[in-house]
Each structure stands twice: as C-alpha cells, then as structure tokens.
Image (cartoon, rainbow, N blue to C red):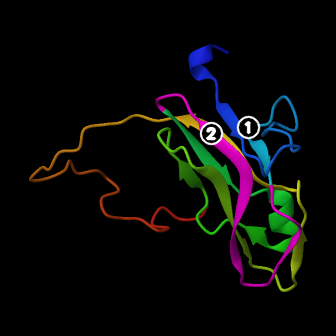
Amino acid sequence: MSAELTVRFLRLPTNPDLPLPHRATDQAAGYDVRSAEADFVLEPGEIRLVATGLVMQLPDGIECQVRPRSGLAVKHGVTLPNTPGTIDPDYRGEVKVPLINLGRAPVTIERGERVAQMVFARFEALPVVEVEAVDETARGEGGFGSTGTR
C-alpha cells in the first residue's frame, strides 16, 4: 500500500493500551474498533457516544464508513443509530461511535470490546448544478419497493 493511501491514527492518552483498528481476517472488509471507555451498561433504548481514544487522518478522497458489528446486533440488539456513519477526510477529532441498545435487556460494554467496524471507501466530489428537468426512465418515480420483492 502506498504512503498516500495509508490511514494514520493518533493514540490519545485515554488509549495507551488498545490495539489500532484491524481486520479479523485477511478477507475482512471492516477494521474492528474498540471502546476506550471504562466498562459501562447500555440500557434498552439508550444511545451512548462511545470514545475510541483515537484520532484518524484519512487520505484525500477516502471516507471511513462506521458500521455495526453483527455479533453485537444479533446477540444483544446493539447497533448504530446512524449506520453507516461517515467520517470525512478533514475531520481531526476523536473517533466516537454512537451505540443504541434495541434489545430488551441491558448490555455491558467492556473497555477494549470491539464495538463497531470501519470500512474505507473512495468517494468523488462532484459538481452540483440546478436544471429545469431530469431525464425520464422506465422506473420513473417508483421507489420504496416498487420493483417488487422477488
């Protein structure tokens, strides 16, 4: 990987011991990110912004999509309320993950627990213009299931 396509992380004093985000397998798209907070309980219906103790520097033209971890979602109903969240390449604050407990029971999140995954993707900054009309298509205005489910 070239230096210009390297994601740089600055470790904050609250995170001297936790590993940097990493992929669990060679074929994984997501890099697991961990909670840098002391153990806490996420009550049913509660939303909490969880600190990672990391500041990230993305290359130009790369975004970071923050997504839920399937294990937390399936086993406990813990997910992200804004999934996928987007971290822009010019953001330099601490990476934080909003968690919500959609389950029926409280869930303990331990320090160092993998709470989300990061997927890096290229994006294009396109010009935006106003027009008088847009091209018609066979689909037209059909949306929200208009093409069927089978």
Q: Which residues are magenta?
A: 35-61
| Percent position of residue 142, x then y | 37, 65
Q: In the orientation shown, which residue stands out farthest toward the top?
A: 2
| Percent position of residue 126, x then y | 31, 37
Query: Which residue is located at x 84 percent, y 28 percent?
Result: 26
Q: Amino acid at mark 1?
A: Ala
Between disc 1 and disc 2, the foreground one is 2
Q: Is residue 150 above or below residue 57?
A: below
**Secondary structure type for disc 1:** loop
| Percent position of residue 137, x then y | 28, 50
Q: Is residue 130 above or below residue 119?
A: below
Query: Which residue is located at x 47 percent, y 29 percent?
Result: 60
Residue 29 is tagged as: 1
Q: Earlier in the sequence, mark 1 or mark 2?
A: 1
Q: Is residue 57 above or below residue 50?
A: above
Q: CA distance from mark 1 to mark 2?
A: 18 Å
* 139 in the magenta segment: no
User: Label 1: how many residues lie within 10 Å, few (<14), some (14-19) or many (20+)?
Assistant: some
Q: In the orientation shown, which residue stands out farthest toward the front?
A: 13
Query: Which residue is located at x 62 percent, y 39 percent?
Result: 56
Q: Which residue is mark 2?
A: 56
* 41 in the magenta segment: yes
Task: Name the image quarter holding residue 67.
Answer: bottom right
Answer left or right for 12 relative to 15: left
For the residue pair 42 and 117, the one nearer the viewer reads as 42
Q: Is residue 68 above or below residue 49?
A: above
For the residue pair 59 and 11, the one nearer the viewer reads as 11
Answer left or right for 135 relative to 45: left
Q: Amino acid at mark 2?
A: Met
Query: Which residue is located at x 80 percent, y 38 percent?
Result: 20
User: Label 2: how many residues lie within 10 Å, few (<14), some (14-19) or many (20+)?
Assistant: many
